[in-house]
């Protein structure tokens, strides 16, 4: 499992849900729906209609990966911060039962309001 206590997934940029890594798509299955996706250099976060998936590519070759599932039912509270004039990044912070604080940082231009709508609907 990703150690969310000692870091966060940083500088994620919104991507087209169709561009989600095929290794993650295998976990989602044919019945699952990707609602929002963002990717960093190697890491990504995917909001589906069932849970949030934090995908962390590991190792020199990138063949090893950690896929952590965060069910919406375990989220006790969340916070969405949009980018400002001088603060160019935005953040989504979740408080997940059994995990603690989970923070995702996004680059400017990422639609964090859409993430807020997804969280409001499913949490």
Image (cartoon, rainbow, N blue to C red):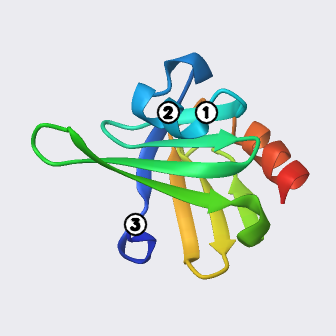
Q: In the displayed structure, does residue 99 sit left or right of residue 114?
A: left
Q: Which mark is residue 26?
A: 2
- Which-is-in-front pick, marks 1 and 3? 1
Of the residues under marks 2 and 3, which one precedes in the sequence? 3
Which numbered disc flags the more N-terminal residue, 1 or 3? 3
Q: Position of residue 112 (x, y in %)?
A: 70, 42
The residue lying at 66 percent from left, 33 percent from top is 36
The location of residue 52, given as percent across then percent down, is 63, 51
Residue 81 at what x, y percent from top left?
68, 54
Q: Which residue is drawn at the image coordinates 15% and 48% (left, top)? A: 59
Q: Position of residue 48 (x, y in %)?
A: 69, 40
Q: Quadrant of residue 110?
A: top right
**Disc marking residue 1:** 3
Q: Are marks 1 and 3 in contact (CB under 8 Å)?
A: no
Identify the secondary structure beneath mark 1: loop
Q: Label 2, label 3: how many angstroms apart (C-alpha)?
A: 18 Å
Residue in the image at 78% along x and 66% along y? 73
Residue 116 in view here: yes
Distance Cα–Cα, label 1 vs label 3: 20 Å
Q: In the image shown, does 2 or 11 lie closer to the viewer?
A: 2
Contact between labelled residues 2 and 1, with CB atoms less than 8 Å apart? yes
Q: Nearer the viewer, residue 107 or 104?
A: 104
Mark number displayed over residue 29: 1
Q: CA distance from mark 1 to mark 2?
A: 6 Å
């Amino acid at each position: 499992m990703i150690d969310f206590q000692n870091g966060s997934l940083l500088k994620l940029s919104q991507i087209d849900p169709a561009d989600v890594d095929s290794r993650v798509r295998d976990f989602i299955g044919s019945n699952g729906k990707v609602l929002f996706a963002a990717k960093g250099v190697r890491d990504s976060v995917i909001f589906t209609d069932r849970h949030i998936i934090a995908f962390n590519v590991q190792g020199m070759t990138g063949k090893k990966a950690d896929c952590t599932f965060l069910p919406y039912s375990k989220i006790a509270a969340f916070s969405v911060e949009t980018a400002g004039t001088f603060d160019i990044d935005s953040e989504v912070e979740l408080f997940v039962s059994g995990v603690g604080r989970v923070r995702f940082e996004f680059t400017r231009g990422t639609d964090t309001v859409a993430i807020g709508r997804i969280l409001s609907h499913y949490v």
